[in-house]
Image: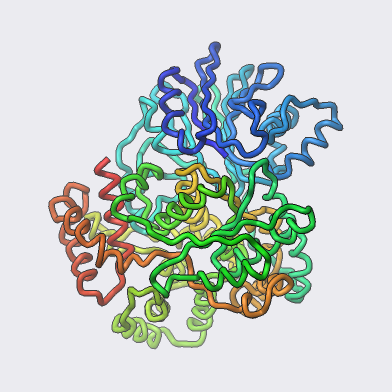
Amino acid sequence: MCGIAGSTAAAPAVLAEMAARLAHRGPDASATWNDAGSGCGLAHTRLAIIDLSPGGAQPMLSPCGRWALAFNGEIYNYRALRTELEAAGETFRSTSDTEVLLRLLMREGLACLTKLIGMFAFALWDRTERRLTLVRDRLGVKPLVYGRLPDGGLAFASEIESLRAHPGLDLGLDREALSLYLACLYVPHPRTLHTGIAKLPPGSWLSWQNGRVESGLWWAPAYTGERTVSVDEAAEELMPLMDSAVRLRLEADVEVGCFLSGGIDSSVIAALMARACRETGAPPPRTLTMTFAEPAYDEREAARRVAEHVGARHGELPARPEAAGFLDTMVRRFGEPFGNPTALLIHDLSRKAREHLKVALVGDGGDEVFAGYPRYHGGLLAERWRRAVPGPLRALAAQAAELIPESSSGRHGWRRAREFLAAGRLDGAEAYASWVEYFSPEERRDLLGLDAPPPRPIAALYRTAPSAAPLDAMQQTDLLSFLPGNLLAYGDAMSMAVALELRLPFLDHRLIEAVGRLGPQVRFAAGKKTVLRAMARRLLPTAIVDAPKRGFNPPMGLWLKGELKGLVAERLTPARLLALGLEPKAGARLLAEHAAGRRDVALKVWALLVYEAWARG
């Protein structure tokens, strides 16, 4: 795992500064390389995980000197690919997965991408054709941003903050991206909050040559399944893929641990890790759990039960994220506003885990892949509601929903009931967007001083889903938006801020493709995570499998009434909101609603604090 940067017009000093801003991602080594014949340069900061020797150093040049590679990530099946290459006559100078990737690219070009099982973002420079190629992994686990230069060139980096070191980029505020941020609490790809910087979308490639840019999609999820099998048959088919996904992600020359919440996702991973360790004679896996003083958020007892059952070496890390003190640092790591406060917990957990581990497996992606969110159940119920209840009655119910109170204590039942009824007048796309977006179109209109409410970005994406089946469309939408823009973004930024590598078995593309071929009636036969629960029953006691999941979220409502109360009053004044390009009256209404406590608007207030911190610079 590493940080990469580069440019088609790279002054050595600029390249060095770009690398310096990525030092946290790769503290084990740092290097730059310049092609004297073209002006292109690559930078790399290394977190050594596979082949700890200098043989794995980057940027890596091909033996013939034609190609140079800067690679961030892991190719989990590199050993099998290396065997194939050796059979074809290739010889290797190292034992790294980077060299395997370089040899594949030399022989097959981008066609080799379909062979890769892994998470990655890389840049390949072809000195003969003077072509720069950027590639991002299928799901967008690893980040990659880029920008066009005034002379037609291209610069790129793992993080926005590194790219900002390159002169010539347009760093002006993209107001439409700001509207998207308010809707999603993150800026969806391909935009960033800077006009001149873009995110390379997941599963995409981009090629630059002589000022001309081409790009395309090389992989995308497809939840369009129509296979009808029993749940047990589906679980039997998927178990070997899940097991393989875990085993491949144990490949490392350092210890690999596991973040264990006690929920079904991380529990399945811990159980499969433990089984693999027993079979190979390796020590039991190390598992780590974050604990909370607030009972509504704490899962230590569930995690202890799982760890004891699988025989893990278990540890507990008390959560003490300092939201106010870490706010500015968090913004620098993202390079733009990011409004999901779970990032604070991931950073706190990663920082403490880094004292014990360099690599950890996590359960992220299980909800998107196996249909685990309560909103999926809501989407299916809403379809029946629209069919069974006349429009006028649904409209009356939507009006009455405004009277439903909410809680800021971590229990979301009343909020979900209100949102469900309030969306009764909307179609499937608009209803789903209303559940997953934060600032409504009307709130964004008022806050940004727009003439009309802007469209819902999630609704637009929902309508592009290849399947009209509600469950298919919801999962497809989340795999293309919420997953890369939110979960994967904070997972990478916050873990790599302390040089900790996170690996995600649920995002093995073989598993996703297999689940996506199952019909919705199989995936949701008995509610959330039907198939995954059937798999889990082969590994864990029923009491663990059926235990309720709390979710890994901070008590932001309580924090805003406590340690962050002064920060809200200090930073979100009418004058400051106006300086930020926001309408003070709309901001004042939001803060008054927060103070009254009738609605839980804590995440919206936090999102404005984060935006203010970013604008502060």
Residue ranking furthest to the right: 87
Q: Position of residue 570 (x, y in %)?
A: 17, 54
Residue 174's place in the image compared with 533, above or below, is above
Q: Nearer the viewer, residue 298 or 572?
A: 298
Q: Position of residue 601 (x, y in %)?
A: 30, 68
Residue ranking furthest to the top: 37
Q: Image quadrant for the N terminus? A: top right
Q: Image quadrant for the C terminus? A: top left
Residue 225's place in the image compared with 27, above or below, is below
- Does residue 346 appear anywhere in the picture? yes
Q: Position of residue 556 (x, y in %)?
A: 34, 65
Q: Nearer the viewer, residue 56 or 411?
A: 56
Q: Quadrant of residue 557?
A: bottom left
Q: Going 50% across and 39% down the picture, which residue do you hit? A: 144
- Does residue 215 appear anywhere in the picture? no
Q: Quadrant of residue 510?
A: bottom right
Q: Going 45% across and 23% down the picture, which residue do you hit? A: 15
Q: Position of residue 54 (x, y in %)?
A: 63, 26
360 with respect to 106 (left or right): left
Residue 95's place in the image compared with 216, above or below, is above
Q: Going 52% across and 20% down the picture, which residue do you hit? A: 40
Residue ranking furthest to the left: 575
Marks counted in the figure total 0
595 with respect to 356 (left or right): left
